[in-house]
Amino acid sequence: MDNIEHLIPITRQLFERYGQEPPLPGLKITYAEAPTGLIRAVYQPSLCVVLQGAKKSVLGDQTYHYQAGECLFASADLPVSANILQASPQQPYIAFSIAINPSVVTELWLQQQAQAKGAGATASTQSAGTSSPALITAKLPPTVLDPLSRLLQLVGDDVNQPVLGPLTERELIWRLLSTELKPALCQLGVADGYNARINTVTQYLRNNYQATITVAELAAMASMSVASFHRHFKSVTQLSPVQFQKRIRLHEARRQLVAQQEIAAISYAVGYDSPSQFSRDYRKHFGLSPLQDRQELLAEVG
């Protein structure tokens, strides 16, 4: 399989049947028939494949453009702003993402290193002394098309998916480790690498968005000095630790808006001490007050 054309009808049928989250762990589908305004989302470690159309994602000061036949790899939990740029009823934007398990990356990378040494080759090593941005775009490697196709075809197969799904995901990662995306994967999977240590912190902040925690405590969590942690955190996420936590809190607050009536209660629930400061930050980030945004969200769902 040397092109993505055959994946378009498969993915479209899955979206029509299951929506954005088909019953395959870690799989998400994006479908749009028109360009979008600004989309705020939190990306998790994953491989996003664009089958049709084009999209732009912004992380901090960095902008990433990717289109049909290309992919975006995220190696950390990241609050990202995005726009779908090319989409129409005749040529909708179609993409899907697959979650990437860091522990599987580590296991397969070590196996690859052992094989290289056994064959007498000089095994490459991943430097733990550098950090790199947690988003990267590339042409979709042809070698991953077959496992991707088989993964999509397993959706809804209650007999084969529980067994073949994890095996096919391992194959996908194994093949990715032989492509130009290997350095990015290794940054995710090498436990003592700076990216992996920063990812530990971003996962903590994502899961404990309401927690009051100092930069010094986060640095200790990453086993770094405060200065080193701040530098590497900004290199990976394009945001300071404080900016990152604020954006995670605001994304969570927006998720709660449709279920919670009291704006003040939401602000306290996500970790703010001041509802007025929460409202100012919310308007600055989303362009609307929390109340205005809730009205628009409720209007969208009817």
Image (cartoon, rainbow, N blue to C red):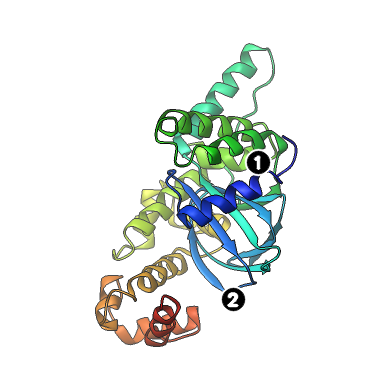
Q: Toward the viewer: 186 or 156?
A: 156
Q: Residue at x 60, y 38 (%)?
A: 149
Answer whether residue 127 is visible to the viewer in this image: no
Residue at disc 1, secondary structure: loop
Q: Secondary structure at mark 2?
A: loop
Question: Which quadrant of the figure contains the N terminus?
Answer: top right
Q: Which residue carries the number 1 mark? A: 181
- The image shows residue 4 at horizontal and vertical percentages of 70, 45
In the depicted structure, whether residue 167 falls above or below residue 36: above
Which numbered disc covers residue 32? Answer: none
Which label's residue is closer to the chain start, 2 or 1? 2
> Residue 174 appears in which quarter of the rendering?
top right
The foreground one among 289 and 185 is 289
- The residue shown at (38%, 58%) is 206
Q: CA distance from mark 2 to mark 1?
A: 29 Å
Three-letter code, disc 2: Gly
Q: Residue at x 29, y 82 (%)?
A: 263
**Residue sticking out furthest to the right:** 2
- 36 in relation to 128, above or below: below
**Could you tell me how many numbered marks the image carries?**
2
Give the labeled residue for mark 2. Answer: 37
Position of 212 with respect to 114 (left or right) is: left
Q: Which residue is painted at 44% across and 83% down in the image?
A: 296
Q: Nearer the viewer, residue 294 or 242?
A: 294
- Residue 230 pos. (x, y %): 49, 59
Q: Nearer the viewer, mark 2 or mark 1?
A: 2
- In the rendered image of this protein, does residue 114 appear above or below residue 298? above
